[in-house]
Amino acid sequence: MNVIVAEKCGFCPGVRNAITLAYETLSKEKIVYSLGPIIHNQDVVNELSEKGLKTVDSMDQIPSGTVLIRSHGATKQQLNQIREKGLRIVDATCVLVKRVQKIGQQLHEEGYKVVIIGDENHPEVQAVVGYAEDVAVIGQVADLCKLSGHKKLGVICQTTQSPDHFAGMVAEIIRRGFSELKVVNTLCRETINRQEAAVKLCKQVDVMFVLGGLHSANTRKLAELCRKHNNATFHLQNWEELDTKVLAGRQTAGVTAGASTPDSVIERFVRHLQAYESSQNSKSSR
């Protein structure tokens, strides 16, 4: 099968830095905890777990040792708890997430009602919320009711959202009543490049595969964007999840991957896909 890989895909600098820091820390420390998965890729989380990284859900599960702050960042409350316990901090927060946190805090100090365009359940957004008081998280038009009565708005965005969604939500906000609106573009350029490359590729192929964790927001967004242009788009974590029946009659496949997807997963998937012949039994290629 002919396989084309998107020009931009796989690990972003922020994720690569977080993983490098994790391995470096594990080589020096006996006890290392991560507040939530270091990145949204179970294969990577499992590998680091074997090296000794313990993933926990709350500070109550960390009695001592070193705490690795994942690429999505941590809330102000969590950071305060870590310091109060006297634990060592290794900060792997993406620099772009730190920028969003800083901008959110500045907007609040300048008297703006801080508005974040994004998913309120995403750890990056949750980490940003603590840097300003009474933040409104807007994921869809229905959430705009949270802005009722506020006249001075400062708008930022979850780094992994698409430019179209950000622009669309800002346009909806503009239709509401306010006296002052300050919009700061906090989108990740790496994410935008991946989205543009994925959309360009999916229009050129018979079937499109988006590789990455099912809980990865940026990977889900890639799949969502590709499906708008190619109905034969599949979001998979790795080669083992592929039902090769979907390859029947397809000549050219496109492959992209989220920012938390290791090169090894992409390379293995592409290698198996290239070796696949449509005349094979649907399961024989595994």
Image (cartoon, rainbow, N blue to C red):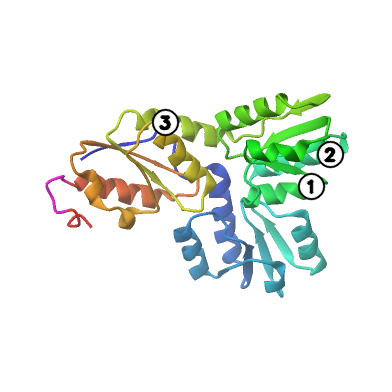
Instruction: Look at the numbered discs 3 and 2 and tell me whether their residues touch, using CB distance below 8 Å.
Output: no
Q: Residues within 10 Å of mark 1 (few under 14, many from 20)?
A: many
Q: Amino acid at mark 3?
A: Val
Residue designated by label 2:
108
Instruction: Look at the numbered discs 3 and 1 and tell me whether their residues touch, using CB distance below 8 Å.
Output: no
Pick whichever, 181 or 151, lies toward us.
151
Q: Earlier in the sequence, mark 3 or mark 1?
A: 1
Q: Residues within 10 Å of mark 2 (few under 14, many from 20)?
A: some
Please state, as top left, top right, bottom left or bottom right, where the C terminus lies in the image.
bottom left
Indicate the quadrant where residue 185 lies: top right
- In this picture, which residue range is highlighted in magenta? 277-281
Residue designated by label 1:
131
The answer to whether residue 101 is left or right of residue 49 is right
Residue designated by label 3:
199
Q: Amino acid at mark 2?
A: His
Q: Residues within 10 Å of mark 3 (few under 14, many from 20)?
A: many
Instruction: Look at the numbered discs 1 and 2 and tell me whether their residues touch, using CB distance below 8 Å.
Output: yes
**Would you say the magenta stretch is mainly helix, strand or loop?**
loop
**Residue 274 position in % (x across, y down):** 23, 44
